[in-house]
Image: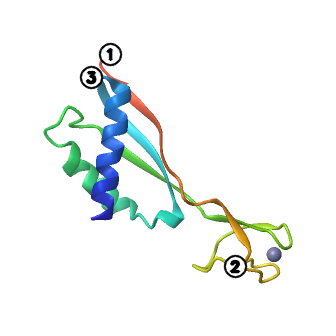
Amino acid sequence: MHELSISRAIAETVRRHAAGRRVGLVRVEVGQLRQVVPDTLRHCWGLVVEGSDLDGAGLEVVEVPATLECRACGSRRELTEPVLRCEGCGATDVAIVSGEELLVTSYDLRGA
Ligand SMILES: [Zn+2]
């Protein structure tokens, strides 16, 4: 499962940074283009951390909308349909500005 491997990757990142300290709440930004279901991701996170050194750590998922920049007309818009095309001029020569994020933005430490 997609979300399960993402959860493992997040846990690895947090574990490396926390270096043995107790972690409370982890915040991640997930781009819309990653096609991650936040509820599924939180569920998988629970499975991944259960019984580990991160047991009890919560996961807050922030979704980042996909944004495209058109190389033809220069406009920048949020993606509203699952088509990589400029909604202004119709060109398909577009660059993805956001929407592919998968970032651990912060985490809280407990009982330090
Ligand atoms: Zn355009």
Q: Height in image: 44 above or below 19?
A: below
Question: Which label number is shown at residue 20?
Answer: 3
Q: Height in image: 35 above or below 13?
A: below
Counting the numbered discs, the total is 3
**Disc 1 residue type?**
Ala
Question: Which label number is shown at residue 85?
Answer: 2
Q: Secondary structure at mark 3?
A: loop
Of the numbered discs 1 and 2, the one sitting upstream in the chain is 2
**Badge 1 local density, few (<14 within 10 Å), some, or many (20+)?**
few
Quarter-of-image position of residue 98: bottom right
Of the numbered discs 2 and 3, the one sitting upstream in the chain is 3
Residue at point 58%, 60% (across, down)? 99
Q: Height in image: 79 above or below 52?
A: below
- Tag nearer the camera, 1 or 2: 2
For the N terminus, which image quadrant?
A: bottom left
**Disc 2 residue type?**
Arg
Circle 1 sits on which residue?
112
**Disc 3 residue type?**
Gly
- Residue 97 located left or right of residue 74: left
Q: Secondary structure at mark 2?
A: loop
Of the numbered discs 1 and 3, the one sitting upstream in the chain is 3
Tell me where residue 9 appears, x and y as whole percent: 34, 46
Residue at point 86%, 72% (across, down)? 73
Q: Quadrant of ligand 1?
A: bottom right
